[in-house]
Amino acid sequence: MQETKVVGVLNVTPNSFYDGGEHNEESKAVEKAMEMIKHGADIIDVGGESTKPGADPVTPEEEEDRVLPVVKKLKNQGITVSVDTRKPHVAEACLKEGADILNDVTALEKKKMRDLVAQHECRAILMDSDSVPVDRSSFTYTDEVVSEARKNLKGRIKAAEEAGIDREKLIVDPGIGFGKTPEQDARLIANLDSFQELGCDVMLGCSRKSFFSELKDYPQDKRLIPSLAANQIGVMRGAEYLRVHDVEETARMVKTLKAIESER
């Protein structure tokens, strides 16, 4: 069974859908990150802009002010850091401070983002989406959502390689909750193993997302167990990375699953 790393979500924003405002002070953010590392996170994914439906845009300068001090502190502690940004200005500042991974919800759509990844030889996460922030008035995917997302990501991988980025540096994410219906999100998770054919590591990011409520009427405060169930399926379908809010519970799930699977 593949190694699966747990990526702890650290939102330094006032308005993220799950924990907005809880960690938007530098000291609180660093404290939360250290807690997640203690509980089993392998990577901390720092984000300074919400991409939930209807989220207001943030200037590059404001996003950098939120994210960069936290990235510096975490790198000083020797932590592997991913930066969740679609802005070249923010990405460049964080890479200069030692950020290890760029998590771009636009899949390195901007040439400058591709050039930065190539220059710094860092890893990058390419996420599939038809709109950022999410536009719930426009759903462009069909019943063939799995092949459509895979085709989109194949195109983004090609663009990255043409910019000089090695495919082994890329991680693909099918973009749960980004422009898909709840049923399409469920189909992507159920067929996550099909993304392995792209020749990249795969990340699943479905933690606490609203599609659980829409699929089976779970309120936001009751999404832990559905998230664990979906992430367990993700591991069994080959996910190398799980991007989650509930690090301790997810890390325990992964360890238990691996221990049981090792006895086959």
Image: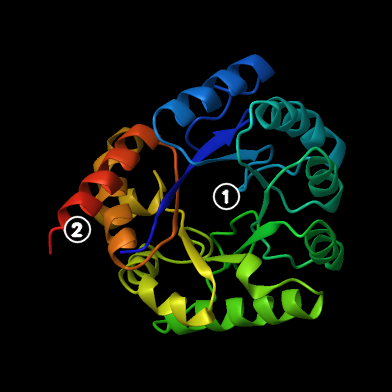
Amino acid type assigned to the residue bearing label 2 in the image = Ser
The amino acid sitting under disc 1 is Pro
Looking at the image, is 46 positioned above or below residue 149? above
Q: Say which of 218 and 187 sits in front.
A: 187
Q: Say which residue label 2 marks.
A: 262
Front residue of this view, candidates 18 and 150: 150
Q: Residue 50 vs residue 227: left or right?
A: right
Disc 2 crowd, CA 10 A, few/some/many (<14, 14-19, 20+): few
Say which element carries label 1.
loop
Crowding near the residue tagged with mark 1, few <14, some 14–19, many ≥20 C-alpha atoms within 10 Å: some
Residue drawn at x 75%, y 44% is: 57
Location of residue 83 (image quadrant) = top right
What's the distance in space between the residues labelled 2 and 1, CA to CA? 41 Å
Image side of residue 12 versus residue 34, left or right: right
| Displayed quadrant of residue 86 | bottom right
Tell me what residue is drawn at x 33 percent, y 53 percent. 231
Pinpoint residue 237: horizontal percent, then vertical percent: 32, 68
Residue 145 seen from this side: no
Q: Where is residue 244? Give x, y as percent.
A: 44, 43
| Relative vertical location of residue 130 with respect to residue 210 in this rendering, above or below | below
Disc sitting over residue 53 in the figure:
1
